Amino acid sequence: MNNPPLFDLIFSLWDSDVDMARDMGVTRHCARQWIARGCIPMAHWPRLTNVCATKFDHPVSYASLVAARLARQGEPSRKVRSLGLYQKSQADEQQEAA
């Protein structure tokens, strides 16, 4: 069985998006966008690591956040796709054909 992505595990620490927003110092709308994207912007990582360690006793390292972020980089954003800025490489097309 595959492990859930790191950010999904982080999101599951909170009971609700309202609680997450309050702890992270952002609006509920912002927290909901993070959850929908499956990622938290790097600018919020210092507070995230602090909250995870102090409130949940679940330390999260910057290295693990970077690795999780890099793992998602292969996925073009909806905005990039909607603007037609994403072009599949030959490797992408070969992988889909296999």
Image: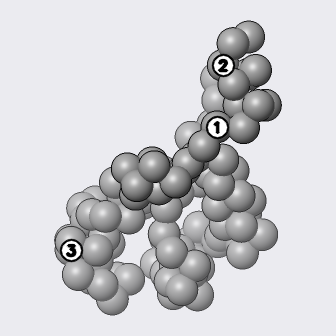
Task: Say which element carries label 3.
Answer: helix
Q: Amino acid at mark 3?
A: Arg
What whole-number distance in Å separates the C-alpha atoms at marks 3 and 1? Answer: 35 Å
Query: In percent of the image, x 34 and y 82: which residue is there?
Result: 23
> Nearest the camera: 24 or 78?
78
Dot 3 and dot 2 residues touching (CB under 8 Å): no
Task: Say which element carries label 2.
Answer: helix
User: Where, quadrant-wise, is the N terminus in this rendering?
Assistant: top right
Q: Nearer the viewer, mark 3 or mark 2?
A: 2
Q: Amino acid at mark 2?
A: Glu
Figure check: 39 above or below 53: above
Figure check: 74 above or below 62: above
Residue 42, percent from left and from top: 57, 79
Dot 1 and dot 2 residues touching (CB under 8 Å): yes
Numbered circle sitting on residue 28: 3
Numbered circle sitting on residue 88: 1
Residue 11, percent from left and from top: 42, 59
